[in-house]
Amino acid sequence: MESREHFDIVLGLTGLKAAGKDELGRYLADRGFVMKRCSDAIREEARRRGLEDPTVEQLQDIGDEGRQRFGEGSWAVELLKMFRQEGVRKAIINGIRNPGEIRALQRHLGDRFVLLGVVAPIGTRAQRFLKRGQAGDPSEMASFLQVDDRDRGIGQPPDGQQVDRCLALVEWENLYNNDSSLEAFHDWIERLLDRIGR
């Protein structure tokens, strides 16, 4: 796959659940970026298996299984193919959850790939997560904490969910602690775009 020549830039988003990755993607969409989530490819696989409204845990299981069977970067590479077929030149891959996905994107894209991270305090994230009510999301705090621990990589195999390890790979100037106002977040995004020349 000749991804490097096809794309102007691909931004990879990693971060804790409900930290603000979707808001970052929405804001960048107004700047000409097209966003897809790693879970889009995983949800497509879930539909092929007959799961119309999979739970977060089912998506995590399918994601882990795909990384085990096809390699740690398989979901990210699948999204690159989708972007390429659609003619997208400025892409966002949201929901990177394993360092293997980062390595695959770096291998395919070189300096056209920029990794971004978003974090926020646990209380803020839990409140957002429980309020958003997406299909398949847990609806109580204990369930959120269980899903969050798995997502971060606590007790998970190397090819499983590993968001904490992904965040450790983000350059400090590309990591945002989303514990302030929406305006402050948007200001950071504008400074980021200036810095990366987009």
Image (tube, rainbow, N blue to C red):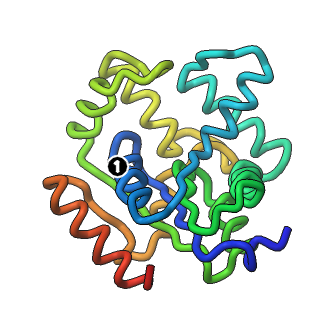
Q: Secondary structure at mark 1?
A: helix
Foreground residue, 87 or 78? Answer: 87
Q: Is residue 95 left or right of residue 22?
A: right
In the image, taking residue 111 as reference, residue 62 lies left or right, namely: right
Mark count: 1
Q: With respect to residue 59, does 36 lie above or below?
A: below
Q: Quadrant of residue 34?
A: bottom right
Tell me if 163 is positioned left or right of 118 in this view. right
- The residue depicted at 68 percent of the width and 59 percent of the height is 100
Residue found 67% across the figure and 72% down from its top: 7
Instruction: Find disc 1 in the rendering and name its residue.
Output: 23
In this picture, is 129 found above or below 67? above
Categorize mark 1 by other alpha carbons within 10 Å: few (<14), some (14-19), many (20+).
some
> Measuring 61% from the left and 32% from the top, which residue is drawn there?
60
Q: Depth check: 27 or 44 in front?
A: 27
Quarter holding the N terminus?
A: bottom right
Where is residue 120 shown, x and y percent of the image?
A: 27, 50
Residue 73 visible? The answer is no
Q: Nearer the viewer, residue 35 or 78?
A: 35
Q: Is residue 79 above or below residue 48?
A: below
Q: Is residue 133 visible?
A: yes
Q: Amino acid at mark 1?
A: Glu
85 lies left or right of 27? right
